[in-house]
Image: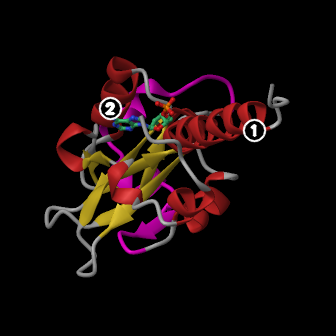
Amino acid sequence: MKYLSITDVLNKDILELMIPSDKVALVQEDNPLEHALLVLVKTGYSAVPVLNASFKLKGIISKTLILDSIFGLERIEFEQLGSHKVSEVMNDKPPVLMASNRFMDAVKLAIDYTFLCIEDEEGNFKGILTRSALLKYLNRYLRDQMYMHTVHSRPVK
Ligand code: AMP
């Protein structure tokens, strides 16, 4: 097995850690909130990407944003779920990386987001990169470094 070096980490292709679009739970911007909430509850995710009909990233929708949008003065107005669209409620400034971005760019952006969206040069949605995938890879690097350090600091008999 090859041990990871700092050069491996700095040059890591973020696409190798990406969840590709066909495995990502998605909603469309013109879906009713009811559909988005169903997707979020059924998948167990707190937020998912929002695309348009041309597969371009438009935003992120979360359970919190949906529930916040239907809070009335005295009660939660569940009937509004069917009459409002995802585009009215979503965060339309999602964290985005280009496929060509460096591993370090991804780590920096992931400090503030649990997942990042990845687009190609034409702005097509490619998939997502989760903070946990980045941490898993960094954890492997740190473990390798610890092992190498232990081996090399042993006294030679
Ligand atoms: P995880 O690191 O697996 O806990 O994922 C962090 C967040 O990324 C989840 O809460 C979701 O918002 C998003 N996410 C992870 N995997 C998927 C997926 N397959 N489809 C849509 N969103 C996902």
Counting from the top left corner in percent of width and height, residue 94 is at: 50, 61
Q: Nearer the viewer, residue 59 or 74?
A: 59
Lower sequence index among marks 1 and 2: 2
From the image, state whether disc 1 or disc 2 is nearer to you: 1
In this rendering, would 1 be left or right of 150?
left
Quadrant of the displayed image that contains ligand 1 = top left
Q: Residue at x 27, y 45 (%)?
A: 27
Classify mark 1: residues with Cα within 10 Å, few (<14), some (14-19) or many (20+): few
Under circle 2, the secondary element is helix
Which corner quadrant holds the C terminus?
A: top right
Q: Nearer the viewer, residue 100 or 80?
A: 100
Q: Quadrant of residue 74?
A: top right
Q: Is residue 80 magenta?
A: yes
Q: Which residues are magenta?
A: 73-100
The answer for how far apart the CA atoms under marks 1 and 2 are is: 58 Å
Total residue callouts: 2
Q: Quadrant of residue 52?
A: bottom left
Classify mark 2: residues with Cα within 10 Å, few (<14), some (14-19) or many (20+): some
In this rendering, would 81 be left or right of 147?
left
Counting from the top left corner in percent of width and height, residue 39 is at: 31, 29
Look at the numbered discs 1 and 2 and tell me whether their residues touch, using CB distance below 8 Å: no
Numbered label attached to residue 34: 2
The amino acid sitting under disc 2 is Glu
Q: Residue at x 42, y 21 (%)?
A: 44
Is ligand 1 closer than 8 angstroms to the Cβ of mark 2?
no
Q: Nearer the viewer, residue 36 or 76?
A: 36
The amino acid sitting under disc 1 is His
Q: Quadrant of residue 1?
A: top left
Q: Is residue 37 magenta?
A: no
Q: Which residue is mark 1?
A: 152
